[in-house]
Structure formats: C-alpha cells, structure tokens
Image: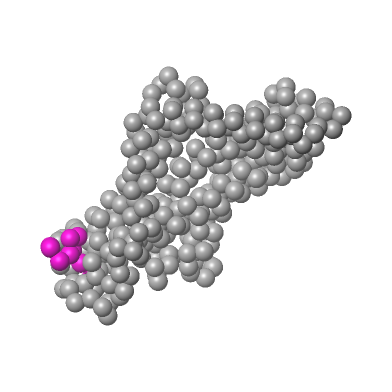
Amino acid sequence: MTPTTDETRGVRAITWARRKQATAGVWREFARDRGGLIGLGGLVLIVLLALLAPVLTDETALEVTNTTAQPRQPPSAQAWLGTDRDGISVLLLVWWGARVSLLIGFSAALLSVFIGTAVGILAAHFGGWLSTTLMRFTDFFLVLPTLVLAIALSAVLPRGIGTIVLAIGVASWPTTARLARAQTLTIEARPYIERAKALGAGHRHVIGKHVLPAVLPLVFAHTTLVVANSIIAESTLSFLGVGDPSRPSWGGILQAAFNSGAVSQGAWWYLLPPGIGIVIVVLCFTLCGRALETVLNPRLRGQR
C-alpha cells in the first residue's frame, strides 16, 4: 500500500522533530563543558574579527608604498604591535593573516573530511575487493609523511591558496577514512539495517538514510581537530616558503620575521603575535573537538 502525501509529511515532521530534539540534547551536554564553551566563544570572536577586517581596516595599509612608519618599530600608540621589516603594522598583518589561515584551514579540512568520509563509508558498506582496494590505498597515504607529501605537492603545483588547500586535504584524509569505516561497520551491524535491506532498501537508501546521519556526528567532531591540524600545516608550509607569497598568513609572517633577523635583533613583537594567534586558534578548535567527542561518545562522559 502506497503512503499518502499527508502520511509522508507526517513522517518527515516526526523525523525533523526528533532531529531537533537530539540537537538540543547535544547542545545541553556541550554547554556543560566549560572548556568547550571557552573554545567556541574564542572561535566565534576570531572568525568575526577576520570577517570584519575589510570593514574595520584598510587593506591598502599592507602595501609597502603606503606606509610611512619606521621598520621594526616597537609597540607604540601609532602601531600597537609594532611594525615589520617594511614598516607595516604587525597588528594589521596578523589581522589579515587570520583570514587566510582560517580560510585554508576550513577549506582543507572540508576537502580532507569529504574524501575520508566517502572512502570510509564505501569501503565498509560494499566490502569485498572494493574495501580491500580502498583500505590499501588509505594505508599507502597513511604511512606517507603528511608534511613531506604536502610540501611535494605545493612545490610541484602552481603556488596559491588553492594549491595549499589541495596539498593539505589530499595528505590528511586517511584518519577520517578509518574513523568513518569503523563507525559504518558498527551501524550496519544493527538490526534495523538488516530489516531495511530485507524490505528492499538499496545502497543509496541505506547509506543516505541510515549510515550517513549516524556517521556525520562523529565525523563533525573529528573535523574540528582536522581544522586545527590544517592551520598548523598551512603555517608550516608558509614558514618553509611554499605558501602563497601574495597573501599575508601567520606562517608567512613568521617566515618574514625569521628571514629578516627578528630573532637576533630582539624584535619580539614581530614574532610573538602570529605565533600566539596560531596557538590560540588551535587550542580553541581542540577544546571544541574534545567537548564534542565527549558529548557524542557516552563512554567518555563520566571522565570529564
């Protein structure tokens, strides 16, 4: 018997109501974790400041031809965090650098999570030779040094933000693939999956309606940690000189400070701000990721 339109709408309404209730429950558990709230608040503030940089500041002030300040000037009323080797405000460099670092971090993490989730779910769902092939492919990337692979890709491909995103994303997806595969195997071993298959549900229905909604929460929690690792990777690549030289980033600022002799000359204001920015952002993402992992994994709730 074919369900009517009203019955279909009723089922969808019940489904959405349950999802809203589950989301509210996750937020209540997350709000109990002070570290997670501090990390989330810090991330919201940093992202807002990065988005508002074009509104609150003038990008032309980052050009060497538009600056009149002295190079390597210590912090003062004119330059709160001092100036760099070209007389540009370090505060502006760090502010605008946050946009590039966050953009690359989020984009590379999304690419990595997309590839890893697809590989993990397909390997666990279909099994057989496809699972063997995908997991051997995953193991191959897993044993490769992530940083070396990213450096090689960045050096071969044209330099730019897209290249850095591609290099980091391609090099960091295997851990997500293993997580998605393990969770998919757990989900597909449950009785309601067997009932769905017995009733004639195809691969698309099982993956889209049952497996993916159950895998995504854990993948989302893992994504916060992947973003933190991607920001560190971007900073490392920029510091090593394979980043985008046309856009200021935290790693690029550190490279310029190191190459200009800021360490030997004691220009601490040139080194500390971008380094502290990296530490704070990574710490905030880590706090959020650990809090989400605790919420989504009942075994860890009693260990807080």
Q: Is residue 138 visible?
A: yes
Q: Is residue 140 visible?
A: no
Q: Is residue 113 above or below residue 298?
A: below
Q: Quadrant of residue 68?
A: bottom left
Pick whichever, 264 or 101, lies toward us.
101
Residue at image location 51% in from the left, 64% down from the top: 162
What range of the chain is rendered magenta? 76-85
Q: Is residue 143 left or right of residue 211?
A: left
Hey, which residue is sitting farthest front in the picture? 6
Residue at image location 45% in from the left, 31% down from the top: 27
Residue at image location 80% in from the left, 34% down from the top: 4
Name the image quarter holding the C terminus.
top left
Q: Is residue 221 left or right of residue 96?
A: right
Name the image quarter holding the N terminus.
top right
Location of residue 26 in the rendering, given as x and y in whole percent from the top left corner = 48, 30
Q: Answer whether residue 30 is magenta in the image.
A: no
Hey, which residue is sitting farthest top in the picture? 302
Q: Is residue 175 above or below residue 297?
A: below
Q: Is residue 294 above or below residue 234?
A: above
Location of residue 124 in the rendering, given as x and y in whole percent from the top left corner = 69, 36
Location of residue 243 in the rendering, given as x and y in whole percent from the top left corner = 43, 64
Location of residue 82 in the rendering, given as x and y in whole percent from the top left corner = 18, 63
Q: Is residue 156 above or below residue 129?
A: below
Q: Is residue 202 left or right of residue 223?
A: right
Pick whichever, 238 or 5, lies toward us.
5
